Image (cartoon, rainbow, N blue to C red):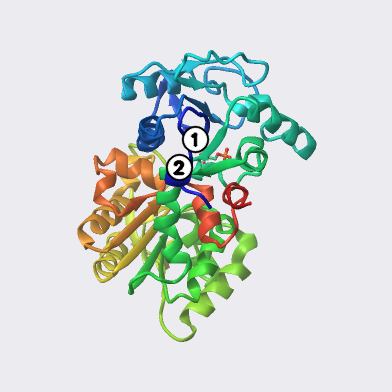
């Protein structure tokens, strides 16, 4: 796969696929992490003498044009960060791109069949996009798991293509984990709701000696599969067999699976609810678990302190509510202090560290990918990366 440094950019029109998909709240971008993450590549492309950068990006999943699916806010903010105008066009098809504009952002590619089920349509759309540029650069790591026109079809049509600095950084940070080249002890912290989105990552690291600290709905499922009553907490009853199999393999030769033995419960989620920190044995009836408890926090923090490499995906509590942030905040702080190689991914974990005022520089790597990071670490070949290699 070619990197930016290998590409001849002088005088070229660069089709630059980025992932600046961001939450929009009250008409504003909720955060600009993904926009800031592409700035080094944009500057490098320009300093290498490119004539024009044409940004290709998506926003949300809907195909309906509306305030939450257009890229106007993104283009404006990118322009402000760069101190240059970013000309935003209202479509991807049938557009006349003014030659003189150095930075041009096309409209959300998903509004133009980017994600169609019909591969003929995706290829046809990719041909339209290919007509706008000479070189293709992909920095959209967070979307590389999608077999979409601008991700996996377009690069196949381009002679000159390669990875941007962000995609390169993501691969360089995550690849050593895949190859088992991380320093040990290696700790994987997993929260969130669904086992099937994380099972690839779990499988990947079971045989690489990782120890797993679980929280969130996933931990509830593991606890329930072991026979604990988790009341009416979020869990997946259909995944008990998967959980039992993982637990058995992790504890076969050594104790490498850690589940919270005390938990924070409340009748309902909310910012002003009464909470109880109780042993897992005491959960019953209609109780609901929303965070790991104090003893579990202490245990997890000790394991983090004793780690050389830590990978975290998914909060261990319902962090959108103040009373249930403690476990995840303690994990974030312990990672920062650990001196270990620390890798964080997943939108909710990243949102939490942002809201705590922690800088991304305090971690070894904060991935811009959610689903893409999970698939990459699950060992899947991502279509967007494969297309750069052909
Ligand atoms: C993300 O936010 O994870 C990426 O932008 C990919 O979005 P998608 O899951 O809608 O494809």
Contact? badges 1 and 2 (CB < 8 Å): yes
Q: Is residue 90 found left or right of 11 in the rendered image?
A: right
Q: Which residue is disc 2 drawn over? A: 164
Crowd around label 2: few <14 · some 14–19 · many ≥20 (10 Å): many
Q: Can residue 220 be seen in this view?
A: yes
Q: Residue 225 location in percent, x, y?
A: 55, 69
For discs 1 and 2, the disc positioned in front in the rendered view:
2
Q: Residue 18 carries which label?
A: 1
Q: Which residue is drawn at 51% across and 74% down?
A: 247
Q: Nearer the viewer, residue 226 or 89?
A: 89
The spot of residue 189 in percent (x, y) is 39, 61
Element type at marker 2? loop
Residue 114: quadrant of the picture = top right
Q: Where is residue 76 in the image (x, y as percent from the top left)?
A: 40, 18
Measuring 61% from the left and 13% from the top, which residue is drawn there?
96
User: Foreground: 226 or 248?
Assistant: 248
Instruction: Identify the residue shown where x is 35% and y is 32%.
Output: 47
The local secondary structure at tag 1 comes to loop
Camera-side residue of 79 and 131: 131
Between 20 and 134, the one lying in front of the other is: 134
- Residue sitting at x 55%, y 35%: 135
Image coordinates of residue 229 in percent, x first then y, are 50, 65
The answer to which of marks 1 and 2 sits earlier in the sequence is: 1
In this rendering, would 352 be left or right of 132?
left
């Amino acid at each position: 796969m070619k990197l930016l440094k290998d590409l001849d950019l002088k005088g070229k029109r660069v089709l630059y696929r980025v992932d600046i998909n961001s939450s929009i709240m009250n008409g504003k971008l909720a955060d600009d992490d993904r926009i800031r993450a592409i700035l080094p590549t944009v500057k490098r492309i320009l300093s290498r003498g490119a004539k024009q950068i044409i940004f290709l990006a998506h926003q949300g999943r809907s195909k309906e044009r509306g305030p939450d699916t257009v890229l106007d806010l993104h283009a404006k903010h990118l322009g402000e960060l760069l101190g240059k105008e970013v000309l935003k066009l209202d479509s991807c098809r049938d557009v006349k791109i003014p030659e003189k504009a150095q930075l041009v952002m096309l409209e959300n590619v998903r509004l133009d069949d980017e994600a169609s089920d019909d591969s003929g349509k995706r290829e046809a759309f990719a041909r339209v996009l290919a007509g706008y540029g000479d070189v293709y650069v992909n920095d959209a790591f967070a979307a590389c798991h999608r077999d979409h026109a601008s991700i996996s079809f377009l690069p196949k049509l381009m002679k000159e293509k390669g990875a941007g600095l962000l995609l390169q950084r993501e691969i360089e940070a995550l690849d050593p984990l895949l190859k088992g080249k991380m320093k040990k002890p290696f700790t994987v912290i997993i929260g969130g709701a669904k086992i099937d989105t994380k099972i690839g990552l779990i499988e990947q690291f079971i045989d690489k000696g990782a120890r797993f600290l679980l929280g969130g709905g996933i931990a509830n499922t593991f606890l329930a599969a072991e026979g604990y009553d988790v009341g009416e907490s979020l869990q997946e009853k259909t995944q008990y067999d998967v959980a039992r199999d993982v637990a058995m393999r992790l504890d076969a030769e050594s104790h490498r699976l850690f589940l919270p033995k005390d938990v924070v419960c409340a009748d309902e989620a909310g910012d002003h609810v009464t909470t109880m920190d109780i042993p897992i044995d005491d959960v019953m009836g209609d109780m609901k678990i929303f965070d790991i408890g104090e003893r579990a926090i202490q245990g997890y923090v000790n394991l983090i302190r004793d780690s050389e490499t830590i990978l975290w995906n998914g909060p261990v509590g319902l962090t959108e509510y103040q009373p249930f942030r403690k476990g995840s905040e303690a994990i974030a702080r312990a990672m920062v202090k650990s001196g270990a190689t620390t890798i964080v991914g997943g939108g909710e974990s990243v949102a939490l560290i942002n809201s705590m005022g922690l800088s991304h520089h305090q971690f070894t790597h904060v991935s811009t990918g959610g689903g893409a990071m999970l698939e990459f670490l699950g060992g899947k070949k991502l279509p967007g990366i494969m297309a750069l290699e052909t």
